[in-house]
């Protein structure tokens, strides 16, 4: 008997997205799976929808995942989305499930971890102390201070050419309001946000940044968010410099942290090289599958960065 699919009211909407949800249940009403569809409302990314599907192991290969997928695809089409993307762990049941249903692998990410308890901080400190003529490091906690706020928002274009392979990622459009809002979300959930940045001494502008989110209690693993250097300032080792300083500060200020987590596209050789040089070790790989939702013969416009 096919599963019953029930749409749910999901309160997890944000200023940048809204979410739809479905629950799958068996003939007795017992939940056997769920699906969540994240619809981005951000300028430059409102062509995408992100999907998460979970099916109880005992209920797999019984049509539950397919029924949830059908509901999500239909909703994404109604919302005129161009791409439906879904992340899965490489080699997991979801890997084969999506491949068999018309999705293609669009992005491969390697996740890595730096173990902190046994970390020798001396090589990290040596990297931080290397001179970089014309540049200096700065850092702040939480929301960016008013002084560098506009320069920091402008520096976010460093991520525009981040290797995203075939994921149809779009372009993130940043301004001061958005960088403040993102930081406030992190703080409101009880975590700490540490940002290290590189300043161009010639004009005082920020030309690179590296963000780290630390659990509110200062324990467990912290998560790197974005790290980027503006194209016109690359080739000077600034990415390695910033990430080394981020590690150094985290180790000194949060002694109970056990590790730092990062993820990098397999095609992003420069950042993988930085992670390797700093001692990060791969833990697993995730794949992002993509389904093209465009009807045959219909061209969807791509909103460009102004």
Image: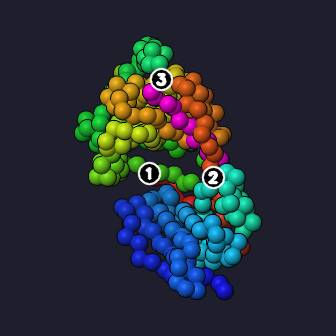
Comparing 164 with 1, the one in front is: 1
Q: Quadrant of the N terminus?
A: bottom right
The residue at 68%/60% (across/down) is 93
Determine crowd level at label 3: few under 14, some 14-19, many 20+ residues with C-alpha closer than 10 A: few
Colouring used for the render: rainbow
How far across and down, in percent of the image, does residue 239 sit? 50, 28
What is the number of the mark on residue 173? 1
Determine crowd level at label 2: few under 14, some 14-19, many 20+ residues with C-alpha closer than 10 A: some
Pair 1/2: label in front? 2
- Looking at the image, tell me whether mark 3 or mark 1 is earlier in sequence order: 3
| Number of numbered discs overlaid on the protein picture | 3
Q: Is 30 left or right of 253, judged from the image as shown?
A: right
Circle 2: element type? strand
- Looking at the image, tell me whether mark 1 or mark 2 is earlier in sequence order: 2
How many angstroms separate mark 2 from mark 3 (CA)? 28 Å
Q: Residue furthest left?
A: 146
Comparing 270 with 175, the one in front is: 270
How far across and down, in percent of the image, does residue 170 sit? 55, 54
Name the main secondary structure of what is drawn in magenta: strand
Indicate yes or no whether the magenta region holds residue 162. no
Q: Which residues are magenta?
A: 108-118
Query: Label 2, on which residue?
Result: 89
Pair 2/3: label in front? 3
Q: Is 217 left or right of 21, judged from the image as shown?
A: left
Pair 3/1: label in front? 3
Indicate yes or no whether the magenta region holds residue 110. yes
How many angstroms separate mark 1 from mark 2 (CA)? 29 Å
What is the number of the mark on residue 119? 3
């Amino acid at each position: 008997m096919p599963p019953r699919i029930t749409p749910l009211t999901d309160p997890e909407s944000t200023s940048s997205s809204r979410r739809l949800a479905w629950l799958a249940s068996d003939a007795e009403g017992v939940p056997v799976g769920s699906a969540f569809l994240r619809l981005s409302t951000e300028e430059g990314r409102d062509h995408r929808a992100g999907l998460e599907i979970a099916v109880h192991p005992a209920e797999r290969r019984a049509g539950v995942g397919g029924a949830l997928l059908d509901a999500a695809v239909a909703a994404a089409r109604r919302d005129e989305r161009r791409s439906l993307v879904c992340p899965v762990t490489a080699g997991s049941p979801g890997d084969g499930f999506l491949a068999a249903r018309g999705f293609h692998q669009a992005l491969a990410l390697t996740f890595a971890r730096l173990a902190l308890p046994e970390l020798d901080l001396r090589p990290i400190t040596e990297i931080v102390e290397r001179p970089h003529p014309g540049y200096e490091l700065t850092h702040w906690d939480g929301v960016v201070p008013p002084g560098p706020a506009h320069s920091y928002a402008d520096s976010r274009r460093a991520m525009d050419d981040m290797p995203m392979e075939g994921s149809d990622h779009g372009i993130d459009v940043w301004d001061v309001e958005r960088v403040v809002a993102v930081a406030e979300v992190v703080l409101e959930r009880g975590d700490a946000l540490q940002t290290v940045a590189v300043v161009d001494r010639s004009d005082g502008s920020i030309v690179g940044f590296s963000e780290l989110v630390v659990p509110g209690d200062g324990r467990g693993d912290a998560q790197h968010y974005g790290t980027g250097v503006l194209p016109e300032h690359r080739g000077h080792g600034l990415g390695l410099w910033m990430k080394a300083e981020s590690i150094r500060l985290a180790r000194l200020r949060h002694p109970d942290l056990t590790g730092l987590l990062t993820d990098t596209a397999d095609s992003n050789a420069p950042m993988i090289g930085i992670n390797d040089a700093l001692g990060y070790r791969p833990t697993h790989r995730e794949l992002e599958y993509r389904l093209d939702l465009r009807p045959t013969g219909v061209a969807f416009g791509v909103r460009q960065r102004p």
